[in-house]
Structure formats: structure tokens, C-alpha cells
Image (cartoon, helix red, strand yellow):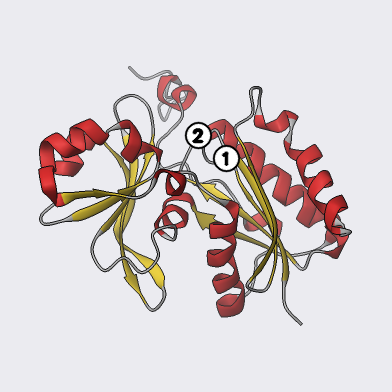
Amino acid sequence: MKELLLTMATATRTTSIAITRGETLLAEVSIDPPGTQSEIILATVDRILDDLGLSVDGMDFFAVVHGPGAFTGLRVGVATIKGFALATGKPVVGVSSLQTLATQVPDYPGNVYALIDARKHEVYAGFFQWRGGLPMLVGSERVVDPELLLDEIDGDALFVGDGAAAYRTLIVRKLGERARFAPWPANTVRASSAALLALDKIRTSGGVSPEKLNPVYIRPSDAEINMPQTGAEGGIEG
């Protein structure tokens, strides 16, 4: 029997929710809400499941894009999926937002750079190459000044993600004809693409308990950066 999976992506401003059965997409909704993601997420899930005649209890697995991305969005998505999993006793899967973007330029033969705008003149960046039917990370995901990233790139490269759109002028200025760009619909982190990665994880190693699922931020939050640090004796350093 094919796996019934609810997948959520909230790493950027767009909220994307998909229901899949095995390799079949049953429904997907992607919304850039005028308010907060938390205001629309549960109602959107309810509407999709109602239209399909399904329920949260009927899911076999839950999946979520766990980062990197917007801190608030990641917390909302991960908390919602963990809540579903805890309520139903079903396992969860977390997948990368950057790898999800890379899946949206399928089987590209060259180097793929997935970029998400991290503000503060930085991007969350991942370098991928397609191998065995999936984009595989080369090195590690990181947060970096886009100019420094571009200085490291040799040869041609395909860029995807809202970070690629935000810094397109800079990319073209630095790389010229060596730069390629994914079609604009591919720049949104889509839950259906995340479901593809989640399904591969499920079939390879299964899911995990919700207690083991946490956001992947990469960069510390402003609150953590500005928090006074205490020394060994409990005094404030600095």
C-alpha cells in the first residue's frame, strides 16, 4: 500500500501544503498570506483534507521543511507537524529547504546553487549536483554573503530560489554568461517537492518520532546574538 503523506513548507513567506499518496500528488496549495502563516495554516490543512475526503488521522507520515529559512516560519511549520504526529502517533520526516529547491530543476547536468534570502545581505546557500535521481549536497549548507559565494564559483552554475531572484543583478554582474537561472515558479519552496525527498527518506530509513524533529536555523537569531553571555562564575561577559 502506498504511503499517505502530509507535507508542509513554511521556510519562506509562502506557506505550501501537499498531500501525496506514494508518487501521486493528490493536492497542493501554496499561499503568500497577507498576515502570519499561523493564521491560515490549520484552516488550509482542514480545507484540503475535507476536499479529498481524508483526515489527519488517516495519514501514514508527516513531513516538513525544517530549514534553513525564516525563523518564525520554521517554528510554525515544525510545531504544527509535530502536533499532528503527536496526536496521531505517526512518524515524521524533516527535509532541507535548499535541497527542496534543487529538486525543482530536475536532472540538471551541471552545478546547482539553491539560495534563500536571509536578509542582512546574506543568503542561505547550498551547492547541489544531481546523482541517482536526486540533488545531492556538495559540502555543507551555510549562510554567506552572496558576493563571497560568487567569488568561489568556477564554471557555469544554475541558480534557484528567492535568493537567486533577489541577487540576480549581482550574480549576472559577477558571473556573466556563466550564470543560469531557473524559471521563476521554481523559486518558491513547494511542499510537493519536499514530499519527493521525504518519500525517499521514508523508504530508505523510515520516519522518526516527533521529539527528534527540530528546526535547522544555521544562523543564530537576533535574540541569541544580542543575548548577554554568562561566564563560568555566572557573571555577564563583555
Identify the residue under disc 1. 74
In the rendered image, residue 68, in percent from the top left (x then y), is placed at: 46, 44
Q: Is residue 183 positioned above or below 132 on the image?
A: above
Q: What amino acid is labelled 2 in the image?
A: Ala
Are there few (<14), some (14-19), or many (20+) residues within 10 Å of tag 1? many
In the rendered image, residue 217, in percent from the top left (x then y), is placed at: 47, 41
Q: In which quarter of the image is the C terminus?
A: top left
Q: Which residue is drawn at 41% across and 25% down?
A: 225
Q: Quadrant of the N terminus?
A: bottom right
In the rendered image, residue 33, in percent from the top left (x then y), is placed at: 64, 29
Disc ID at residue 140: none
Instruction: Please give left or right for residue 151 compared with residue 96 in the image.
Output: left
Towards the viewer: 44 or 66: 44
Instruction: Please give left or right for residue 159 compared with residue 49 in the image.
Output: left
Q: What amino acid is labelled 1 in the image?
A: Leu
Instruction: Please give left or right for residue 179 compared with residue 200 in the image.
Output: left
Residue 88 is drawn in which quadrant?
bottom right
Are there few (<14), some (14-19), or many (20+) residues within 10 Å of tag 2? some
> How far apart are the two marked residues, 2 and 1, measured between alpha carbons?
6 Å
Q: Count the marks: how many?
A: 2
- Asked whether the beta carbons under mark 2 and mark 1 sit within 8 Å of each other, the answer is yes
Instruction: Please give left or right for residue 231 compared with residue 194 in the image.
Output: left
Q: Can residue 145 be seen in this view?
A: no
Q: Is residue 165 positioned above or below 139 on the image?
A: above
Identify the residue under disc 2. 70
Q: Is residue 171 visible?
A: yes
